[in-house]
């Protein structure tokens, strides 16, 4: 079974390494399409308009997908992908399209809620956002939490200074949202909490 893994976020470089690795470890043949190379080039020289860069990303993705004919297409977020590209991928490859979206709920009204119907399955790291997708008509929306790669984590060596700096009972790593602040404020006096 062939999976085409589609991503391109320089800030998510670890995901782009461990997700294909995990899929290979469970027996899939994994092909990778990283649009970051095209976007990075555009950011450096700032010559090609953003819309032209998106067109190039979509064109190259379609050509690559046609060349490998995957059984599954796994998109990590996918902001530069056009809805027309998703429709074409589905029609021409007959692959199962799924998305794992890691920025809910704040992107739901502006992006993820609009593109979710064009995927066969839509996964969100936020369990509360599943309801948003289902109310928006996407019955195959599910919660898929973050995980970790034991090979990466087990290789980390901490100095005594690092242990003093990072040691705590509860660590929160993430972006600020009012709801998160409210929840964290409820536990800050009960646990040794560090927020990053």
Image: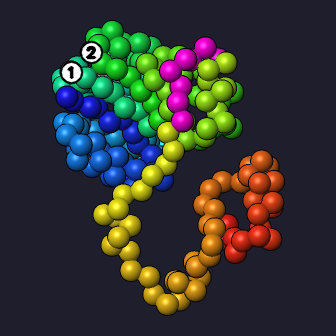
Quarter residue 130 falls in: top right
x and y percent of residue 40 in the render? 42, 47
Is the Cβ of the residue at disc 1 closer than 8 Å to that at disc 2?
yes
Quarter residue 75 falls in: top left
Tell me the element at label 2: helix
Residue beneath label 2, please?
93
For residue 92, above or below residue 66 = above
x and y percent of residue 181 in the render? 78, 55
Per the rendering, the mark at residue 69 is 1
Ranked by sequence position, the earlier of labels 1 and 2 is 1
- Is residue 117 visible from the viewing direction of this image? yes
Q: How many marks?
A: 2
| Residue plotted at (64% across, 33% down) | 129
| Residue plotted at (38% across, 67% down) | 153
For residue 137, above or below residue 23 = above
Q: Which residues are magenta?
A: 136-143
Q: Quadrant of the C terminus?
A: bottom right
């Amino acid at each position: 079974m062939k999976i085409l893994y589609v991503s391109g976020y320089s800030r998510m470089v670890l995901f782009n390494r461990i997700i294909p690795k995990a899929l290979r470890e469970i027996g899939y043949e994994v092909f990778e399409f990283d649009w970051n190379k095209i976007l990075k080039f555009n950011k450096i020289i700032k010559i090609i308009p953003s819309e032209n860069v998106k067109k190039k990303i979509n064109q190259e993705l379609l050509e690559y997908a046609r060349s490998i004919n995957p059984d599954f297409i796994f998109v990590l977020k996918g902001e530069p992908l056009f809805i027309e590209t998703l429709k074409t991928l589905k029609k021409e490859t007959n692959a199962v399209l799924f998305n794992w979206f890691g920025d809910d709920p704040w992107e739901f009204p502006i992006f993820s809620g609009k593109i979710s119907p064009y995927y066969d399955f839509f996964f969100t790291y936020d369990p509360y956002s599943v309801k948003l997708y289902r109310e928006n008509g996407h019955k195959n929306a599910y919660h898929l939490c973050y995980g970790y790669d034991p090979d990466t984590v087990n290789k980390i060596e901490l100095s005594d200074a690092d242990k003093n700096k990072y040691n705590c009972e509860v660590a929160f790593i993430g972006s600020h949202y009012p709801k998160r602040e409210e929840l964290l404020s409820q536990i800050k006096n009960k646990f040794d909490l560090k927020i990053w």
